[in-house]
Image (tube, helix red, strand yellow):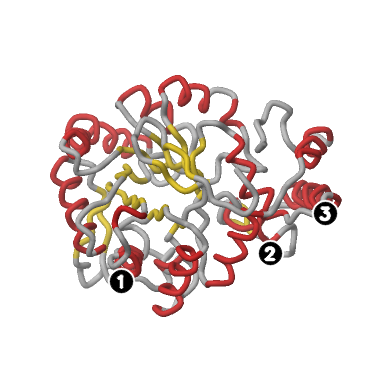
Amino acid sequence: MTAGSIGVRRLGRTRISVSEIGLGTAPIGELFEKVDEGVAADLIAAAWDGGTRYFDTSPWYGLGQAEHRLGRALYRRPRADYVLSTKIGRVLRRPAAHEHRHPWWVGGLEFQAVFDYGYDGVMRSFEDSLQRLGINRVDLLLVHDLDDWSHEDPAVLDGHFETLRTSGWRALAQLRDEGAIGGVGAGVNTAEAIPRFLDAFDIDFFLLAMRYTLLETDVLDAVFPRCAERGAGIVIGGGYNSGILATGAVPGAMYNYAPAGPEILARVAKIEAVCRRHDVPLAAAALQFPLGHPIVASIIPGAINVGQVERNLAAFRHPIPADLWAELKHENLLRADAPTPA
């Protein structure tokens, strides 16, 4: 990575190269906060103007709203100039009278999401996404949330996984073989889900949320080496651990969607102190650290306004001296074997 530029990296086993920083679109689906239509359009434009060329979305984000908003912002752009990924695993339908929107989405659209990892569900989700986006091709398609974060009952998780193995994967492989998509991935919230996918499927990459950050590096023990052996690439979501690595150790800072506890607050405060000694914003270290690993192709922070996009881009471009990483390791704030950016 060169300060001032946004490079591209080939993603895993695909032939697709993605910009090293992308844009995640869960926030414009109105995850926890409402986002005005014009603001959503402006922040996507700001990401584009700043050099971002990889955009990730999902039917789940705002129950279709994020796909609509992203599609309207991109459909007049030259299609060859950007990479677009979306997901399968949920099908949207009209809600019954007694059903209410999922509490995560304070806004979004009035639909109900139903898990469906079968052949017909995959194909319907894919075609519905194209319609919502208003774009007749997506580059990458991911299996979404097939992990114990989203399916707490092991029997339910096993059932969905078996449906994917015996039915839904045939649709994904067909789309890939026909050239309708350029790669198949899995978007997961727990690293434990990755080996299961590697054992069962011919998968190209993973989108891993919150599990490879300045605060979480356990994937270096076994998960990332297995991905490297198979040639599976990684996209990093949740690089700020849902907030604290952007805000710092402030009162009310969020860590993995919950208020950070004393231990995490203390650790982040120590990381911040090292960053200050090297004149580096905490957010810059958080965004750039995962890209030190050779299998990581991109990191995709979200945003709720133009200012956040601009701050993310500035943090991504901020020069970081090698001494900062060395001091974090010396202070036992970062494990010694963690690869760091050159």
Which residue shows up at 33% across the image and 68% down it?
Answer: 65
* Foreground: disc 1 or disc 3: 3
Please state, as top left, top right, bottom left or bottom right, where the C terminus lies in the image: top right
Which residue shows up at 62% across the image and 64% down it?
Answer: 311
Q: Which mark is residue 276?
A: 3
Specify few, some or many for label 2: CA neighbours under 10 Å numbering under 14, 14-19, or 20 or more: some
Residue 299 on image: x %, y %: 52, 47
Residue 213 placement: quadrant: top right
Apparent side of residue 48 relative to residue 131 in the rendered image (left or right): right
Residue 288 on image: x %, y %: 63, 46
Apparent side of residue 71 relative to residue 312 in the rendered image (left or right): left
Specify few, some or many for label 3: CA neighbours under 10 Å numbering under 14, 14-19, or 20 or more: few
Q: Residue furthest right?
A: 277
Apparent side of residue 55 relative to residue 278 in the rendered image (left or right): left
Residue 132 placement: quadrant: bottom left
Q: Distance between the Cα atoms at labels 2 and 1?
A: 29 Å
Q: Amino acid at mark 3?
A: Arg
Q: Nearer the viewer, residue 216 or 96?
A: 216
Q: Amino acid at mark 1?
A: Leu
Q: Earlier in the sequence, mark 2 or mark 3?
A: 2
Label 1 sits on residue = 109
Please state, as top left, top right, bottom left or bottom right, where the N terminus lies in the image: top right
Residue at disc 1, secondary structure: loop
Which residue shows up at 35% across the image and 65% down it?
Answer: 70
* Foreground: disc 2 or disc 1: 1
Work out whether residue 100 can be spotted: no
Label 2 sits on residue = 252
Residue at disc 3, secondary structure: helix
* Foreground: disc 2 or disc 3: 3
Q: Earlier in the sequence, mark 1 or mark 3?
A: 1
